[in-house]
Amino acid sequence: MSSQRVDSRGAGPGAAIDAADVPRSPDESLFRRHFENLPKPAYIWQKVGDDFLLIAHNEAAAAAGGPCSGAAGSARQLSEQLVMRLTECAETQTVLREEIDYPPAPPEPRRLIVTMIPVARDVVVQHSEDITDRHRAEQELRASEARIRALMEANPDMLVRVSRDGDYLDVHIPPGVSKNLPFGPEHFHGHNVAELFEPEFAEAHARYRRKALETGEVQLWQYARMAGGRTRYIDARFHRSGDDEVVVAVTDVTERVDLEREVVNSVERERNMIGHDLHDGLGQLLTGVKLMLEPLKRNLSAADPRDANALSQAVDLLNQAIAQTSELARGLSPVPRDGGCTLANALQQLARRTEEFFNISCCVARSDVADGLNEECSNNLYRIAQEAITNAAKHGKATRVELRCYVRNGRQVLEIEDNGEGMSEPKANARGMGMHIMQYRARAIGGQAVVRCRDGGGVIVSCSCPVPLPGQ
């Protein structure tokens, strides 16, 4: 027989009674079969005086040990707390359920769910389920969630979880970020990107989501938005977090961009100052010396041909020095504010020098420049074109470069297209030194430099920046 009975009228704890000696009703037989075949440990306790005696247990209980192990058959032998709980269950005729550690002391207590069911005024059935592994897993999960939550709270960036279709699933917005948003975290939950933002933004967001899901690679989207009365510069990184969702880390890099702009502007101011000094200082001195030597050259031609020839060579060297000084000044200050030069003129000169220096074809196909484009934007766009042409000639082995400059939707656009060897898509998006410099300059004027592969070979470098308002 798989269960045991203890005669509370005189048999000692653990003394088994044969089932044949116990008369059974049909209900009792059904109960005993059910009790014996329970998959979890089960015990039957009977109240005797102020204690409870174990009168039966099933096979699962025998295999688990616990109250069935050794000679323990009294609840008080196990713990006073067990007696108290059994007494409460019997007296109140209420089912009790609780989680306990058994044994209550180390080294390795097991976590149990204990259910006590009163079946008579003096009889209680106890079920025990070992949930130690589940309990440990839940503890580890809670600890992991706490660590992740702490990391998120310490992260100064905005984090959003978005489905493939653009539905916001979860949002974390630090206080420092929320002040620059037109709405709070509650406006994201249950909404779609297309519901909260304009169509152009939603389309770009969807494009980066798709690419992150398709490639499994982190996609970087850099853009600018108006918030809090000024332009904020944003880096958004799209990470695939499931088959149909991405996590987007949104970083406000406005302060960094402002610093980059100050650095670039400082460098450009130094260059312009040196260029102006070369042009207006050294260049003018050399020109003055040349003008003083011209009459002397004419007078010596008749008096002493040999001295006249030496003087003529000196004048030629002065002309070369003046030309080099002018070239250096133009390179340091390609679009001077007070020189009457525009970005269109500077690009034309750059194209001519490119043909001479690299021996390739270079032309300006379009040269539309916004009237309000300031010196800062002009100089940085010029430097971007200069860097792109150098990359095309040196690394892309291009034989033809075409420059296009035009205005679209209130932004000045510059494109440099070449017919070189081109590059793979990963390299096009890589941050080499040349690309880094172009991005650095583009961001300094509120724009972004993008490199894409050209059909048939070669690449197209494009940069657009907002046209500053007068006085900016």
Image: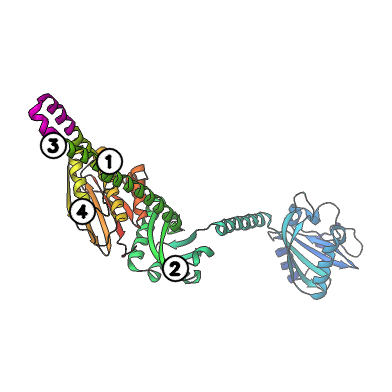
Instruction: Point out residue 290 in the picture as x, y percentages from the top left corner.
Output: 19, 37
What is the CA distance from the residue labelled 2 to the residue labelled 4?
35 Å
Residue highlighted by disc 1: 282
SS assignment at label 4: helix
Nearer to us in this view, 274 or 40: 274
Instruction: Point out residue 308 in the picture as x, y percentages from the top left corner.
Output: 12, 28
Residue highlighted by disc 4: 344
**Residue 7 seen by the camera:** yes
What is the CA distance from the residue labelled 1 to the residue labelled 4?
27 Å
Q: Does 379 appear above or below 395?
A: below
Instruction: Point out residue 128 in the picture as x, y percentages from the top left corner.
Output: 73, 61
Marks 1/4 in contact by CB < 8 Å: the verdict is no
Nearer to us in this view, 14 or 434: 434
Badge 3 crowding class, 10 Å Cα cut-off, few under 14, some 14 to 19, many 20 or more, is few
What is the CA distance from the residue labelled 2 to the residue labelled 3?
67 Å
Dividing the image into 4 quarters, which one contains the C terminus? bottom left
Magenta span dominant secondary structure: helix
The amino acid sitting under disc 2 is Gly
- Residue 195 picture quarter: bottom left
Q: Which residues are magenta?
A: 295-316
Residue highlighted by disc 2: 228
The amino acid sitting under disc 4 is Ala
Residue highlighted by disc 3: 295
Q: How did the renderer colour the structure? A: rainbow
Which of discs 1 and 4 lies nearer the camera? The answer is 1
